[in-house]
Amino acid sequence: MKKLNLTRVVVFSIHSWLGLVTGLFLLLLGISGSGLVFLKEIDQTVHARLLTVKPTGKRLPLDSFYQTITRSYPHIKGIAWLNPGAAPDRAYEFRLYQNDGKISTYDLGMVSMDPYSGKVLRAGNLKDFNTGLLHWLIQFHWSFQLGLPGLLMAAVFGITMLISILTGLIVYRKYIWKVLTFRVGIKWKNRSTITSGLHRIVGVWALAFNLIIFFTGFWMNMFAFDQRYWQKQMTPCPANTLTKQSLESLLNQAYQKMPELIPLSVYLPTQPGSDFKVSGTLKEQNPLFQGGNSISFDAVTGQQTALKTIGEKSLWEKTELTFFPLHTGNFGGIIVKLLYVLIGLLPSLLSITGFMLWWRKQNFKYFSRRRKYP
């Protein structure tokens, strides 16, 4: 019996201290994550005048945008065209992968351009607000705007939250079924019982969601533990080596060879050893398994180097494809996204109620000592 009690005390202590130490960061991750669920919709609404273009004839070839970006940014690792399926009146969005050799910065940038005139509508790095608050939030959610150390912190906090969830599962195991069957509610007697009940109920109902969110977040940030990645990021990016092939021609070949492909992104190489790559989903493919299909070409010779479809992937590879949609909520419609916004705020609420419970306990200990030793 004593051993059991000691185990529960240790588990409860781990649960409490993990929540206390990481609470603020989890609060920031929860709020920023919820804000990013409707990233595209909000960005298009807030910057509607800037990002809405007037169709005037035929769109410019992909090579034109490539040349403009590489002239303005002569030292970048690569470019991703984020909306190859953009509507005729929408600006093209390009993500820039940069590297200044400093671990204190995570060098993501973006450029928005008019598909018909090639005019740059907005440009900047995600570490500032030139491209808008939401794009700044992307990098904040990814790395707290602290570069590689922040990226590593986010991965570590994913682990601590998973441990916190598992220890919470042990601490509140007797209440789980009661909460789920509505046999336990919140006692509204005072602030203490309200906080305790709210923490318990929110924790139980958010259990599965938190496990999914924080595991997928950790998994996608796991490369932050790779020493080789840090070494690469500490070497500034060399000057661009431009492709010798027509990117527009390679894009048309990709569509011809994979006519069922719905493109989600197109990678434009700027360094030796990288291929031109079109990635996307297939018609009738489950939205939970986004991507998983791609075709690549050598940017120097123009030869096809790879063609991959989701049907060829292993069970684990297919499972990994679900991690990003499950983390962001972009596999469903507006109802799913609204649920993600709401449930995404629950870790923040758990952090607040957990801190209040800890604070109450500290005050109780303090006043108990005062009464014992006046």
Image (spheres, rainbow, N blue to C red):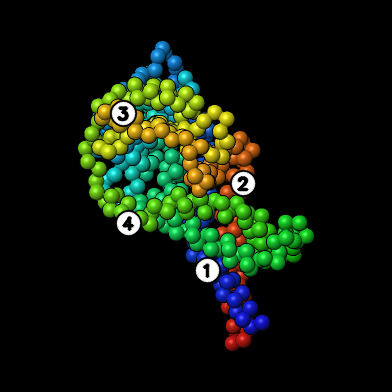
Extreme top residue here?
57
Indicate which disc, 2 or 4, sits on the residue closer to the N terminus.
Answer: 4
- Tag 4: residue type? Gln
Please tell me which residue is depicted at 58% across the width and 63% down the height of the picture.
166
Q: Are marks 3 and 1 in contact (CB under 8 Å)?
A: no
Residue 98: percent from left, percent from top: 31, 41
Q: Nearer the viewer, mark 2 or mark 3?
A: 3
- Tag 2: residue type? Leu
Asked if 156 appears above or below 98 in the picture, the reply is below
Alpha carbon of mark 2 to alpha carbon of mark 3: how far? 48 Å
Between 245 and 195, the residue placed more toward the observer is 245
Asked if 108 appears above or below 214 in the picture, the reply is above
177 on left or right of 247 = right
Q: Which residue is mark 3?
A: 303
Q: Are marks 2 and 3 in contact (CB under 8 Å)?
A: no
Alpha carbon of mark 2 to alpha carbon of mark 4: how far? 36 Å
Q: Which residue is mark 4?
A: 227
- Tag 1: residue type? Trp
Indicate which disc, 3 or 1, sits on the residue closer to the N terminus.
Answer: 1
